[in-house]
Image: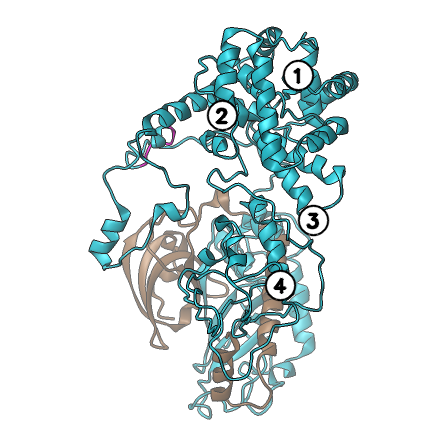
């Protein structure tokens, strides 16, 4: 072909390649379209066409065309006669005639012309379409070509070159529609190093390894860890063995307790064989709702009956009945009532005579239900709450009592170490809590509140009741009564309850109502925001310490910051040695947040509420213990 | 042409492993895929001749035979092209080309106008950060 020799674009004229006859190019293209069409279909057909057309029957020609087609779209290097090297995307070739090449987005990598022996140019050129006539062509080098499977490598090669890649396009190789069929994981090879998951907890707990010692030895780190800071201190004394035994018994009792709750059963290792269609979600993670609701619904009518009964006589009978057996998970008031009623529906009949003999029977029937009722300590708390400023009357107390009762129901069970069987345990729990039994009915609560004019007195009263009622019953009840009375001693009895979740602090001192406590009224004015450097100065020069002694020791704020020795320079009082917040509840100190005169060392109480609110804090302290 | 025995009996040439030296000073070895006499182009595939045909990515050279300075026959092997597997999906070819061009255009936009090579190379290096 007679072409203008414009193989290498001159550096000065960026469009030199375009000087190629456009018609040449078009001619080439048109020719090219015959053998190499983009109309789809296999190249072999077009190859044969082309060969027939052009008379190139030799298979070598076909191969050449095949290879050329494979190259289309690939970046190639073209060596031309004068030594220049062009680089571009292989676009087309005129296989019919001489093998000319069209490159797109091509650039001169190395100029071999005489003029351009140096680096191609000082100016970077934009890539353009270049046509290399066959005459100039020396060599075409394409790297990374896969000839055999080239046809069907669809998106794989391009994935990296595409400018816009979507995830689905990237993973296009496997088009899996819909969800995959999940398979349970099985370990491929039994890895001896993997500890068995099942019995990882069966090993000896301590393994004779003390992490603190190890750390100290390895790194010289001395630990100040004290277990008792984080948990209740176990008092190892002569009582220890007994307490241990008791705790074990309680634990066994609870663990062996029958439950209908799926998750509880799973935890305890009870196999529910009958329901094989439980999927993993139901077994392990979902929240069981139906059962509780069912219980509730079934027993709605019974609630009324219970209420009546309970309202009638706040005696041991009702107490026995107020033994809310509810499922462990149903821990709200509504379900407490449900449990009441469920208990009831099992045949327990309200026996105003105070006989608790039928109780064990019905208890047996309700094995799966847990006891959910309140020892009288709950009532104590309720009382405290009431006195402590939530003067909302019965409402709050009821709610509080509801919660508390549910939280502590099993406690009462545990207060009787002498019980052997669960039934009896439950039984006793019932009985002991008889008087203190909680029922959802407001009537009873009011009665409770009435009965408990003061914390301690109320408890004693309730103590009397179960004892009296129990004595009328069978022997083991008698045991109950004897044991229950001491068992029901305030707060300390709770300490023996170890199994049930409890919000009680067994070691908390009993709250003694402070008659001087001012009811809390939140006020925005007198609260100094206390950033760290600010110090709240508690200065009460004229107040003696006797006020301080009025406060229960357990309420100390001091322990909160043990490291500080607040030096309160108090010229008048001498005894201010204790590192506790010096608060006088009776003193209207609200306006006295001031630093007198010269710079006195002050009590540094970072971020502590002012006095007035401190009082509130004090009064509410026990609730949160 | 000093291509020697290349012209005659190209069928024999297919599959041969040659070591070729070009007039431009290039040397390479490869297996002959084809030799097209009309256009005088020798298609050589570099790489070991008997590589697994799974997904062999090799370099392919299209060399004008008249630029072969010398060559030597290293071995004779089978046809590297399995004719039963030589299928081309033109649509994908077209798509590949379009993608390549698109990519090249994007790359070309990074090239400044009227900048020196050095500046361009610096820009290219920093562009990635």
Q: Position of residue A154 (x, y in %)?
A: 57, 51
Judge the density around disc 1: few (<14), some (14-19), many (≥20) Cα neighbours within 10 Å: many
Question: Can you identify the residue that label 1 sits on?
Answer: A321
Lower position in the chain sequence, tag 2 or tag 1 = 1
Question: Can you identify the residue that label 3 sits on?
Answer: A389
User: Between tags 4 and 3, which lies in front?
Assistant: 4
The color chain B is rendered in: brown
User: Between tags 4 and 1, which lies in front?
Assistant: 4
The reply to whether residue A51 is in sight is no
A138 or B126: nearer the eye? B126
Mark 1 and mark 3: Cα distance apart in space: 32 Å
Q: Is residue B33 left or right of residue A442?
A: left
Question: Can you identify the residue that label 4 sits on?
Answer: A587
Mark 4 and mark 3: Cα distance apart in space: 19 Å
In the image, the segment drawn in magenta is: A194-198
Judge the density around disc 3: few (<14), some (14-19), many (≥20) Cα neighbours within 10 Å: some
Above/below status of A319 relative to A352: below
Q: Position of residue B125 (x, y in %)?
A: 47, 79
In the figure, residue A529 lies in which quadrant? bottom right
The reply to whether residue A395 is in sight is yes
Judge the density around disc 4: few (<14), some (14-19), many (≥20) Cα neighbours within 10 Å: few
Q: Secondary structure at mark 1?
A: helix
Mark 2 and mark 4: Cα distance apart in space: 39 Å
Q: Which chain is cyan?
A: A
User: Between tags 2 and 1, which lies in front?
Assistant: 2
Mark 2 and mark 1: Cα distance apart in space: 20 Å
């Amino acid at each position: 072909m007679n072409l203008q020799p414009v193989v290498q674009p001159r550096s000065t004229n960026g469009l030199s390649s375009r000087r190629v006859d456009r018609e040449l190019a078009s001619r080439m293209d048109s020719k090219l379209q015959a053998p190499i069409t983009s109309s789809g279909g296999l190249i072999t057909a077009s190859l044969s066409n082309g060969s027939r057309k052009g008379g190139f029957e030799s298979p070598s020609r076909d191969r050449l065309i095949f290879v050329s087609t494979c190259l289309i779209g690939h970046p190639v290097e073209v060596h031309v006669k004068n030594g220049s090297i062009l680089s571009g995307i292989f676009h087309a070739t005129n296989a019919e005639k001489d093998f000319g090449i069209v490159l797109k987005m091509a650039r001169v990598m190395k100029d071999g012309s005489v003029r351009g022996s140096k680096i191609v140019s000082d100016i970077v050129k934009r890539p353009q379409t270049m046509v290399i006539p066959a005459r100039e062509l020396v060599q075409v080098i394409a790297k990374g070509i896969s000839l055999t499977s080239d046809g069907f490598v669809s998106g794989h090669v391009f994935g990296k070159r595409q400018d816009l890649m979507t995830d689905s396009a990237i993973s296009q190789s496997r088009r899996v529609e819909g969800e995959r069929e999940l398979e349970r994981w099985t370990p491929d090879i039994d890895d001896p190093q993997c500890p068995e998951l099942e019995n990882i907890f069966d090993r000896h707990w301590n393994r004779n390894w003390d992490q603190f010692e190890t750390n100290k030895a390895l790194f010289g780190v001395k630990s100040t860890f004290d277990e008792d800071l984080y948990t209740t201190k176990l008092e190892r004394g002569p009582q220890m063995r007994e307490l241990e035994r008791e705790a074990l018994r309680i634990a066994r009792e609870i663990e062996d307790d029958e439950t209908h709750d799926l998750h509880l059963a799973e935890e305890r290792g009870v196999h529910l064989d009958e329901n094989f269609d439980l999927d993993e979600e139901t077994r392990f993670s979902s929240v069981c709702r139906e059962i509780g609701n069912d219980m509730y619904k079934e027993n709605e009518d019974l609630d009324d009956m219970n209420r009546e009964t309970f309202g009638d006589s706040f005696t041991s009978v009702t107490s026995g009945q107020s033994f809310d057996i509810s499922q462990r998970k149903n821990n709200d008031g509504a379900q407490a009532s449900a449990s009441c009623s469920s208990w009831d529906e099992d045949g327990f009949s309200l026996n105003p005579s105070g006989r608790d003999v039928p109780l064990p029977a019905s208890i047996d029937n309700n094995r799966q239900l847990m006891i959910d009722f309140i020892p009288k300590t709950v009532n104590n708390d309720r009382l405290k709450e009431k006195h402590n400023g939530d003067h909302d009357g019965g409402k709050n107390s009821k709610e509080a009592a509801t919660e508390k009762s549910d939280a502590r129901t099993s406690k009462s069970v545990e207060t009787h170490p002498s019980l052997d069987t669960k039934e009896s345990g439950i039984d006793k729990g019932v009985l002991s809590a008889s008087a203190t039994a909680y029922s959802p009915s407001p009537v009873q609560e009011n009665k409770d509140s009435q009965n408990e004019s003061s914390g301690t007195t109320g408890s004693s009263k309730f103590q009397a009741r179960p004892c009296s009622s129990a004595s009328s019953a069978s022997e083991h009840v008698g045991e109950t009564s004897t044991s229950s009375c001491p068992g029901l001693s305030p707060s300390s009895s709770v300490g023996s309850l170890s199994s049930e979740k409890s919000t009680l602090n067994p070691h908390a001192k009993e709250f003694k109502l402070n008659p001087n406590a001012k009811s809390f009224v939140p006020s925005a004015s007198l609260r100094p925001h206390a950033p760290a450097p600010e110090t709240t100065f508690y200065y009460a020069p004229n107040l003696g310490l006797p006020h301080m002694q009025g406060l229960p020791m357990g309420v100390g704020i001091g322990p909160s910051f043990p490291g500080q020795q607040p030096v309160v320079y108090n010229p008048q009082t001498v005894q201010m040695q204790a590192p506790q917040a010096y608060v006088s509840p009776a003193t209207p100190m609200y306006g006295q947040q001031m630093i007198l005169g010269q710079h006195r060392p002050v009590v540094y109480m970072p971020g502590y509420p002012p006095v007035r609110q401190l009082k509130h804090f004090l009064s509410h302290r026990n609730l949160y213990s | 042409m000093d291509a020697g025995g290349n012209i005659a009996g190209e069928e024999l040439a297919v599959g041969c492993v040659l070591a070729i030296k070009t007039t431009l000073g290039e040397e390479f070895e490869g297996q002959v895929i084809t030799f097209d006499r009309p256009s005088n182009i020798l298609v050589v595939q570099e790489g070991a001749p008997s590589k697994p045909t799974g997904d062999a990515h090799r370099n392919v050279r299209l060399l004008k035979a008249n630029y072969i300075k010398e060559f030597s026959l290293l071995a004779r092997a089978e046809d590297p092209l399995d004719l039963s597997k030589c299928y081309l999906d033109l649509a994908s070819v077209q798509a590949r080309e379009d993608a390549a061009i698109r990519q090249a255009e994007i790359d070309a936009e990074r090239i400044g106008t009227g900048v020196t090579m050095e500046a361009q190379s610096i820009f290219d290096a920093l562009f990635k950060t």
